[in-house]
Image: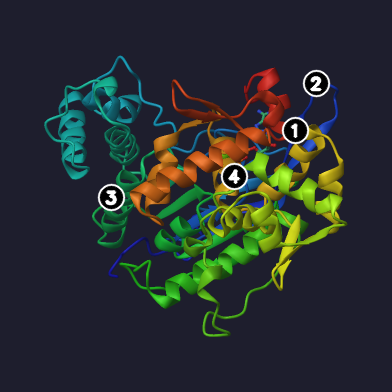
Amino acid sequence: MTIHRGTTSEPLVKLLGVTKMYSQPDNYDILVLDDINLTIERGQFVALLGPSGSGKSTLLRIITGLSEPSYGSVLYRGRPVTGPNPHASMVFQSFALYPWLTVQQNVELGLTAKGVPLAARHEKALRLIDLIGLNGYEDAFPKELSGGMRQRVGFARALAVDPELLCMDEPFSALDFLTAENLRSELLDLWVDSKIPLQAILMVTHGIEEAVYMADRIVILSKNPARVAEDLTIALPYPRNRKSPDFVHLVDQVYKIVTDTDEDHKPVSISSPAGSPQKPEESERARLDPIPYGHLSMLSGLLELVSDRGGRDDLYHLGSELLLEVDDLLPVTDTAELFHLARVSEGDLILTEQGKVFAEVDVAERKAIIRKELLDIPLFRLIGRVLESKTNHAMVRDFFIDILEEHFSQDQAERQLMLAINWGRFADLFHYDTDTELLYLAEDQLPEAEATLLGQGQADS
Ligand code: ADP
Ligand code: MG
């Protein structure tokens, strides 16, 4: 990597005790960012990773000067940031293009604002449109473009002003899988080959693989409030191979830190990648294990039956009694095991304590038990994460199909998602509209803070 990115030793960005509180309607302040101290050096591609709602976007807005910290300060090249930083530009998840402006006009926006003369503006915009692979679309309007093309415009617009610091807020998460993957590697090419005069990139993401794929440093935030839980260097050379053992291992390590951070809000340290080898099934990629094709109604019936028999019965016996082949029964018992309701031992199905409770309680309580269990299953966490992070809390099913097809055959991906939708709806985890093919969250399914926020409208101070 041959990059000349500035010569001074002063860090590009320095956060000193950045703290942010939002006041609630009842005057009770919530602490979102707690004493964040962070330095971004020239030449770094930093990924900011953290659970949904942890404060990543808030931090990004503060760094770019779009929002003020409640306490602490942001230094840019040693000087306090007091308003929108002219040396930084932003790429948004939602593209944020002006629908009534053409591609070229959208790209020129920042230049117009800076007072760049017309001819220079045109020249610059056309060069970037070309660089980002959109030549021929100069006069098109955003609505004529696919999501991937719109985000290309978003990148071109952000890069047109020759920013020193490029900030991106989940720039790939609204795109389909392949488009996102293309854009990621194109951006990396630009960065690694120094085709753009950038000094540093800061990318907010909740994709662990994406962070390990792109960044040379990952800062992990904890939640409630956000603190820097971990600051890791990713020393893998570019271009990175997602299938290489080092890559898989790192993803796995980061995954562990993030889940630990998510669960008990405590930072943990990681061993060096050269340390103990990880079981492959623990990597994020392999974590999308297929869910068993168990029908929940059959599951309930089976558990009630076994409960009547004192909490244990012979599977073979159960099968013949229910006129079920083992092939039909096993997905149901697998589901029971997955939900920690029962275990199979020596041909017997044995209810767990939770299984005994499940067999006794009403439907509402059964739903609650299944909901809790689903939240531990990677596929449902993925769905939850995506829906929570989208501003409209909705996503088309094809988006998930695309992801599942990375792990399963096309057929199996369809079946897996259909089943997941069934389970998720049963457990009230999310809704699904068969007409629009949208999975979505209703107000009561949102995390508490966010539901409040939605209710009051999302205006920043
Ligand atoms: P992330 O980008 O990590 O998902 P955000 O920075 O958007 O998180 O939000 C962090 C927390 O701050 C959330 O709990 C959110 O509800 C709250 N929050 C964000 N913006 C506001 C605001 N303008 N007013 C009140 N609370 C807010
Ligand atoms: Mg955000």
Q: From what the image shows, is residue 253 above or below residue 13?
A: below
Left or right: 49, with 320 as reference point: left
Tell me if label 3 and label 1 are in contact, CB under 8 Å: no
Horizontal and vertical percent position of residue 21: 75, 36
Amino acid at dot 4: Lys
Q: Is mark 2 within 8 Å of ligand 1?
A: no
Q: Of tags 3 and 4, which is closer to the observer?
A: 3
Q: How packed is label 1: few (under 14 Cα within 10 Å), some, or many (20 or more)?
A: few
Q: Which of the labelled discs sits on residue 182, or is there none? A: 3
Is 260 in front, or is 11?
260
**Residue at (68%, 37%) from the top-left corner?**
427
Q: Is mark 3 within 8 Å of ligand 2?
A: no
Amino acid at dot 3: Asn
Q: Residue furthest top?
A: 100
Helix or strand or loop: what does disc 2 sit on? loop
Helix or strand or loop: what does disc 3 sit on? helix
Q: Is mark 4 within 8 Å of ligand 1?
A: yes
Q: CA distance from mark 2 to mark 1?
A: 14 Å
Q: Which of the two discs, 2 and 1, labels the residue nearer the N terminus?
A: 2
**Residue at (31%, 64%) from the top-left corner?**
4
Helix or strand or loop: what does disc 4 sit on? helix
Q: CA distance from mark 3 to mark 1?
A: 35 Å
Q: Which of the two discs, 2 and 4, labels the residue nearer the N terminus?
A: 2
Q: CA distance from mark 4 to mark 1?
A: 18 Å
Q: Which residue is mark 1?
A: 448
Q: From what the image shows, is residue 264 above or below residue 170?
A: below
Q: Is mark 1 within 8 Å of ligand 1?
A: no
Q: Which of the two discs, 3 and 1, labels the residue nearer the N terminus?
A: 3
Q: Which residue is mark 2?
A: 25
